[in-house]
Amino acid sequence: MEPDAKAGMAADWERFSHWLHCVCIVTFDLELGQAIEAIYPPHVKLTEKEKTSTCYLAFPDSNSGCHGDTQFTFRFRQSPSRRAIADVIHDVDMPVLLQRDPHYFYGYVYFRQVKDNSLKRGYFQKSLVLLSRLPFVNLFSSVAKLVAPEYFEKLEPCLEAACKDIDRWPNPIPGKTLNLPIMGLVIQVRIPSRSDKFSACTLKQDICENMLPAPLVLSSVHEGDMFRALQPVLPHLQLLWELVLLGEPLVVMATSPAATADTVLALVSSIFPLRYSSDFRPYFTIHDSEFREITSQKQAPPSVILGVTNPFFVKTLQQWPHIVRVGDLRGPADASKQTKIKKVNKLRSLDAKPGVYTSHKTYLTKDRAIIKRLQKGAQRKRPSEVQNAILRRYLMELTHSFIIPLERYVASLMPLQKSITPWKSPPQVGPFVPEEFFKSLEHAGPQLTSVLKGDWVGLYRQFLRSPNFDTWFRARHSEMTQKLELLQLEALLRAASLWSCLYRPAV
Amino acid sequence: MALRELKVCLLGDTGVGKSSIVCRFVQDSFDPDINPTIGASFMTKMVPRNNEIHKYLIWDTAGQERFRSLAPMYYRGSAAAVIVYDITKEETFHMLKTWVKELQHHGPQNIVVAIAGNKCDLVDMREVQTELAKNYAESIDAIFIETSAKTSINISEMFEEISKKIPCVEPCTNDRPSFKLRPLQLESSSSRCC
């Protein structure tokens, strides 16, 4: 068989498929508009709808002068006709946040727009998009950054080589530090595991001092520069945390998809280790197949976080309760002086000043110390890794303080060990009674671990009605039920062996 | 003992046996029906050298013409390059000379070059005379060795020669005057920057 024919066969691409679905090249065709020029590996199929989504999401929406090279991330729902992917064994040990998304694709885009008089349009406009189920934003953005510029110069063979490299990568096994060779470089990254301590263990640069050339060490597969993304709205950090925690409809407006994507992804991960369970779109366009559903004015806005750049949305989403307006993230950081919360109806155009437009009153009092600390750090040019570590730690502790009382209460719903007998069916996990939970807060509330004052009960009350609570509670409930069944089975086995001992016929 | 990672790339015409040399060196195996490489394949192997361990990061590039333009990605940042020709095919020796020129113009400074005349077990079919190739190698200050991946001749010896010729990080017992390596990663990152 010819090697080329063989390369197209699915069986050859098994390892590749653990990382990526495919690579798409999206170009601007004078007659068709955005069009897919190539899909690699060639055997991979996308439905027409998925192709359309990829095409629109691969390019900036407005002509806001994304000149040169731009990188951003998008996420869209797979076609309903596509079967959900089967569970992958090593996913079980992956932190929930990083498990592969069975209904969504992530797209990691590298877009280039440069003047080129040799082309009829006068411009070279092309995107390389990595489609994956894995939310490894940092890793795949780095991969796109390595591959795309080479591809734009060297074309097809480069794509072939890159995909072949990925097809030789070891599987993404949680807890492992992997060396991932690609395009003449080795990327070193650790896949997080569920059993990680939360003090994120990062690879130290110093272990590879003697390496020539140094491998590209990524401190994380998924974490981006959260501080830079949230800096324009830093004074509203807690307010945003509350909105995300409560699953409130939220729209992020900016002039570039890079800015919206970074901000949306930072918001979604702000409630880590809790999973944000509603839909989120780092970059959303008017061409989305769910555009009508999501922006319908006939019903209340759904629980979703959208990132938009098209000025059209200012009007379409005017009844949305919370709007975050960020400037160009690469611009000066004076936006963080916008400490006042503005009324939504003040937002008339995309040129509006950066800030948060909402009528939400925070339940918790503001913690000025953390904001001051981060702002001072920015003034003193503290390294971004340190700023990020401070910010993530703060948010994680806040989420922990919030979630620990819930964990404690739910643990108390577990039936007592003695109620498990081999003679009866397993006892049930008790019902979640909000009033009882609120009562438990008096002696074991978040005041034990957080200095923040305010209406914690009010925050819990609204949280209990949110999709985030629903997902969290379901997961806990099924874990506990499983444990009960296991205990019951053990009790049965003990009884059975006792029985056989007692009634063993004398030899 | 200090561990030192060294990037090494294999260059040369299609079918001269680059992948077979790497397979023999890393896995001590030989497959006469090996498939043509796509892009480049990557393997590693540790070799002790004085008070260091050299970990070779080997990029075995595709010899086919259509992958030709990708070569800079693989020799960029390399401490050594092995250029392979087939002693039974004269045109592969000419191809070798174009690779040498490309490295001289665009490759990293101080890159150690080794020239390997592969398939030396096929003496009856020889088209490139040893002396000719040896003289050429000397003229460009390259290591010269005839190898056979099939019969395992001179494969590990070649990598030993390369190890000897690679300058130490600190002054040590080396037959060449040692000097500080310039940070090659800087070069690679700047050229990748967009």
Image (tube, coloured by chain):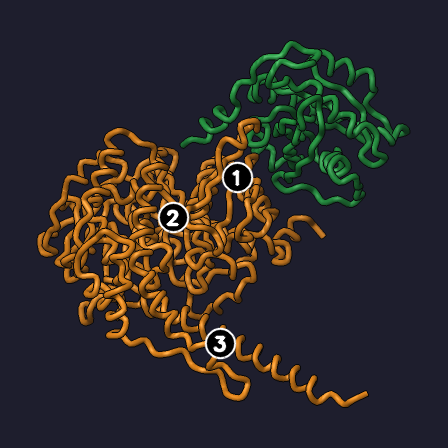
Chain colours: A orange, B green
B90 and B178: which one is in front? B178
Question: Disc 2 marks which amino acid?
Answer: Asp
Q: Chain of mark 3?
A: A
Mark 2 and mark 1 lie on one chain; the one further toward the N terminus is 2
- In the rendered view, would you say B139 is above or below A389? above
For label 3, the crowd category at 10 Å Cα-Cα, with few meaning under 14, some 14 to 19 and many 20 or more, is many
Q: Residue at x 65, y 37 (%)?
A: B62
Q: Say if residue A160 shows up in the picture.
A: no
Question: Which residue does the numbered mark 2 point to in the structure image?
Answer: A29
Q: Residue at x 50, y 35 (%)?
A: A216
Give the quarter of the figure containing the N terminus of chain B.
Answer: top right
Q: Which label belongs to residue A478?
A: none
Q: Residue at x 78, y 89 (%)?
A: A506
Point out residue A432 in the picture as x, y percentages from the top left corner: 32, 75
| Label 2, label 1: how far apart the Cα atoms are | 34 Å
Left or right side of A109 for A346? left
Question: Which residue does the numbered mark 1 point to in the structure image?
Answer: A187
Q: Secondary structure at mark 1?
A: strand
Which image quadrant for residue A233?
top left
Question: Which residue does the numbered mark 3 point to in the structure image?
Answer: A484
